[in-house]
């Protein structure tokens, strides 16, 4: 989901008294900026206004050292709600389409290899980063894990963290415009998913809260890496696949999720020197262009080899955040399960394969020619 990096530790609540040390004023100011950004983007009819608007304004606020913060304490509840939203995209009819995902899943493995190699080459030859930092910063996913692994191998953890944060920020800020151009002007901006909170029956709210709580417990029981996201998503998906409910997430909840996501991503750069951010952003722009170009090529090719639309494949392969890309899929009324499943597999491939490949390459460099 939204990125975190070492620079945010100063904004996180202390372990002893999380509510006492919570920066209420700075967080309220950040949310206020996010709302202004959402309203501005809505007025301009730009795609995903509540996510991109809040993200843009809060990023600018971070660069100008405004007193804003989005502590980690606010993330789990919203992440659980987002997980429920993603799970609601699964339906009994989906089970009959799983076989058609084979080609796109196999293509995803090739995509991870090509995208990772291209970004490593760029960061080594153009950005002049050392091998370890370039490698773990170039991986298309797994921010926290890549930072940990990269630091253990001797890489620059701060650069790796900022590169991944900037990647998510830039992909989420640019991809909706590309998707909108392919799907039709104004599609994302006009979309309103679901019914209003005021119109939804009480059972909808009960399912939303119940699957969120049960999902978090399930995620912790299974020791999932992203328990607050994947747990509720699995719980919600199970209830929908079983036909127990077909509740539609209220659009106010989705707008709130986008607002909080955008605000937290924008605030992730708070406390970082402007010179460092400028350098990281310059490198990230290059990797983002490379990643989006490769993503588009794979989406166009696989569109001819599979029954899926180019826009759905573009979102499924995009190296952005799982929650962010799935929210775009919701806005476009695409198959959220298809998009979410591919992102989970991509992260799995990166987490499992990145260290193994790096170890193998290191051995090859050390072996005598």
Image (spheres, grey):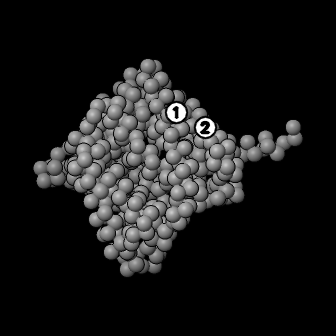
Q: Which residue is mark 1?
A: 294
- Residue drawn 13% across the image and 53% down it: 198
Report the front residue among 215 and 200.
200
Q: Is residue 181 left or right of residue 171?
A: left
Asked if residue 57 shows in the view, the reply is yes
Task: Return the residue found at the far right.
Answer: 368
Under circle 1, the secondary element is helix
Q: Quadrant of the C terminus?
A: top right
Residue 34, x across and y down, in percent? 31, 60
Asked if disc 1 and disc 2 are in contact, CB closer than 8 Å, the reply is yes
Q: Residue at x 46, y 31 (%)?
A: 296
Quadrant in the picture for residue 121: top right
The answer to whether one can see residue 92 in this image is no
Q: Residue 10 vs residue 229: left or right?
A: right
Relative vertical location of residue 60 with respect to residue 311 in this rendering, above or below:
below
Q: What is the crowding at mark 2: few (fewer than 14 residues within 10 Å), some, or many (at least 20)?
A: some
* Residue occupying image coordinates x 34% and y 33%: 181
SS at mark 2 in the image: helix
The image shows residue 254 at horizontal and vertical percentages of 27, 50
Residue farthest along the top direction in this orientation: 304
- What residue appears at the point 32 percent right and 69 percent down from the top-left corner? 29
Given residues 105 and 251, the one toward you in this image is 251
Decide if residue 205 is on the left or right side of residue 289: left
Q: Which residue is mark 2?
A: 118
Residue 187: percent from the left, percent from the top? 26, 36
84 vs 116: above or below: below
Rendered position, 238 above or below 270: above
Q: Nearer the viewer, residue 46 or 324?
A: 46
Who comes first in sequence, dot 1 or dot 2?
2
């Amino acid at each position: 989901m939204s990125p975190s990096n070492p620079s945010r530790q100063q904004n996180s609540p202390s372990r002893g008294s999380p509510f006492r040390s919570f920066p209420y004023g700075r967080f309220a100011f950040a949310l206020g900026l996010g709302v202004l950004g959402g309203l501005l983007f809505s007025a301009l009819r730009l795609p995903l206004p509540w996510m991109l608007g809040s993200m843009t304004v809060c990023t600018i606020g971070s660069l100008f050292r405004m007193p804003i913060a989005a502590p980690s304490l606010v993330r789990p509840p919203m992440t659980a709600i987002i997980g429920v939203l993603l799970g609601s995209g699964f339906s009994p009819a989906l089970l009959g389409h799983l076989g058609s995902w084979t080609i796109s899943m196999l293509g995803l493995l090739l995509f991870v290899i090509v995208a990772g190699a291209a970004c490593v080459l760029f960061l080594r030859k153009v950005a002049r980063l050392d091998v370890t930092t370039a490698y773990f910063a170039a991986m298309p996913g797994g921010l926290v894990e890549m930072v940990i692994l990269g630091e253990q191998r001797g890489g620059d953890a701060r650069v790796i963290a900022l590169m991944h944060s900037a990647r998510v920020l830039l992909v989420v800020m640019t991809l909706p415009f590309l998707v909108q151009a392919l799907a039709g002007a104004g599609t994302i901006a006009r979309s309103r998913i679901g019914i209003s909170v005021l119109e939804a029956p009480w059972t909808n709210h009960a399912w939303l809260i119940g699957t969120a709580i049960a999902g978090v417990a399930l995620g912790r029981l299974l020791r999932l890496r992203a328990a607050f996201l994947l747990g509720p998503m699995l719980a919600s998906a199970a209830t929908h696949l079983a036909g127990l409910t077909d509740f539609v997430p209220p659009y106010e909840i989705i707008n709130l999720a986008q607002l909080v996501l955008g605000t937290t991503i924008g605030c992730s750069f708070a406390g970082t020197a402007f010179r460092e951010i400028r350098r990281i952003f310059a490198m990230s722009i290059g990797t983002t262009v490379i990643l989006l170009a490769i993503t588009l090529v794979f989406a166009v090719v696989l569109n001819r080899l599979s029954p899926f639309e180019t826009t759905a494949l573009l979102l499924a392969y995009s190296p952005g955040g799982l929650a962010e890309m799935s929210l775009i899929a919701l806005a476009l009324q695409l198959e959220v399960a298809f998009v979410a499943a591919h992102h989970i597999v991509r992260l799995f491939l990166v987490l499992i394969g990145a260290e193994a490949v790096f170890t193998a390459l290191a051995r090859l460099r050390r072996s005598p020619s």
